[in-house]
Amino acid sequence: MRLRLPVVAVATLALISPSVPAAAGTPAPSQLVFGACPDDIAQPYPTLTCATLQVPVDYRQPSGPTTSLLVSKHAANNPAKRQGALFVNPGGPGGSGVITAGYYATPDESGFTALDSAVLDAYDLIGVDPRGVRHSGAISCAAPDYFPVPQPDPDAPATRDAMWKLWDGYADGCGANVGAMLPHLGTDNAARDMDRVRAALGEPKLNYLGGSYGTYLGAVYTEFFPHRVGRMILDANVDPTPPDLFYQLAKDQSVAGQKRLDTYLAWMAEYDAVFHLGSTTRAVRANWNKTLADFRKPHGSVGAHELLGALFGVLVTEEIWIDFAQILSTYVNDGDDTALVEFAAPSTSAGTERFNAIFSAVICVDSKWSHSKATYERDSARLAKVSQFAWDNMWITGSVCRNWPVPNHAPIKISGRGLPGILMFNSVGDPATPYAGAVKLHKVLRGSVLVTERDAGAHGVFASTQATMNTAANAIGTKYLLTGELPPRDISVPGHALPVPTPAALKAPSEKKSPAVGERWRIS
């Protein structure tokens, strides 16, 4: 997934200490009363019930203003086997835990659920929309059509002044529109909020399944509330160690994304008889590079920025590898750009803008950022020598946070002390949360066990989609959730199978569109 958007300039970034989990005298949260969910939740996920919880805007002022969190619950399918509550978070920042609980619990047309039925029997699934997300006081920084469609070419030197101005203007909008809530939207407060929900549910421990950015949220929770950690699975892991963690992650994503693209191009070459894009990786790369060059002169609503964003979304999961290869083939071999433009066309919906806003608000306060344009441009120029994603990624990270209008929070050092065993998963080729970050988090979380998916690169290993399901990994994670038993040591499992473009797969119905928001941003 990706990153996006800035606010009002400040001369220096002062640091706000996040070290105190909650102020002394914080009132105990009331019990949650579950009832009907909002219509946009209830319609796709009818098994969910919802409740709201008021939490302090500023935990240093526990009796001050509050904000409302939406909490969803899918009750354990078998009350006789119930073991407790399992909190879920899909990442982002900006992903909806409320929706994720519904996704995990609801069978698709074939009856498939990402979580094993035994887990659904044993746990209430609890989803929280973090503060600033969707039904928990969603923030917005600008009109949905603030960004031009298409956006300027991210690599063109001639567009850089315009790009800095564009992102600075968006930053100003965040400062003006979000107001007093803006300083309190970091992961530190999201972790405190999660513990308030745990307490309101009457759960003595927090059992947790977090993916991508959700692994960082989980890691911060372990630092604030180590005595409250129950069974915890962290999948597709964020390295919490750099002070500029989200900028460093964005740079790492650029390199990992290019490596993942190499794998995808080689896969297309393997099926040249189907896609006719070339029988070698070099030949397929030439066709992709020509397409990208063509789109630097926009085709309707799609230019280089939109095409690169759509491609990165394809790289995080193989579910749409066949679709995108077919669409690229149609453009390369027939000269018809209709399907490619439709696939990569950007969303200008209010929901997309709200996602952009909270995504930016969290990453900008969570880590240190340089004020220097030269720093970002120098780093991007260096990375552009090895990655086509470098400049585009910089515009949606450094440019948004360079002059954020509120101070960043002091980076949270994860000590990993006093914790039960935590189970971690990561694929070796994940482009959004590169494997090296999982190794660093694993080292920090003492006593954790890391399960590595070899020869794979999907973003997420455990409880993934049907197309990227790894049965060995799922068995390990399911056993841990049901019994608390970890593998005796770090292990690796074979990668799941890549898609095969059989005639049935090629003819299968497909929306053939770019992945949803939350998959298209470079942090997830």
Image: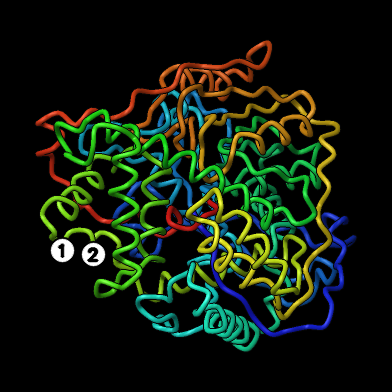
Q: Residue at x 49, y 67 (%)?
A: 155
Q: Is the image coloured rainbow, by chain, by secondary structure, or in one colour?
A: rainbow
**382 versus 500 height, above or below:** below
Q: Give SS at disc 1.
A: helix
Residue 388 location (% of width, % of height): 47, 54
Q: Residue at x 17, y 59 (%)?
A: 339
Residue kind at label 1, given as amino acid type: Thr
- Residue at numbered disc 2: 341
- How packed mark 2 is, by other alpha carbons closer than 10 Å (few <14, some 14-19, many 20 or more), is many
Looking at this view, is 505 or 136 the one in front? 505
Task: Give how far across and how far down residue 145 sits, in percent.
Answer: 39, 83
Which residue of the protein is positioned furthest toward the bottom in this rendering? 176
* C-alpha span from label 1 to label 2: 5 Å
| Residue 198 shown left or right of residue 83 in the figure | right
Residue 5 falls in image quadrant: bottom right
In what element is the residue under mark 2?
helix
Q: Quadrant of residue 149?
A: bottom left
Residue at 80 percent of width and 27 percent of height: 446
Left or right of 205 in this view: 460: left
For the point 55% across and 57% down, which residue is it?
390
Answer above or below: position of 335 versus 141: above
In this orientation, which residue lies closer to the viewer: 34 or 502? 502
Q: Which mark is residue 338?
A: 1
101, above or below 81, in the image? below
Is 175 drawn above or below residue 262 in the view shown?
A: below
Q: How many marks?
A: 2
Q: Residues within 10 Å of mark 1 (few under 14, many from 20)?
A: few
Residue 364: percent from left, percent from top: 68, 67
Instruction: Indicate left or right for 295 with 335 as reference.
Output: right
Query: Foreground: 84 or 433?
Result: 433
- What amino acid is labelled 2 in the image? Val
Tag 1–tag 2 contact (CB < 8 Å)? yes
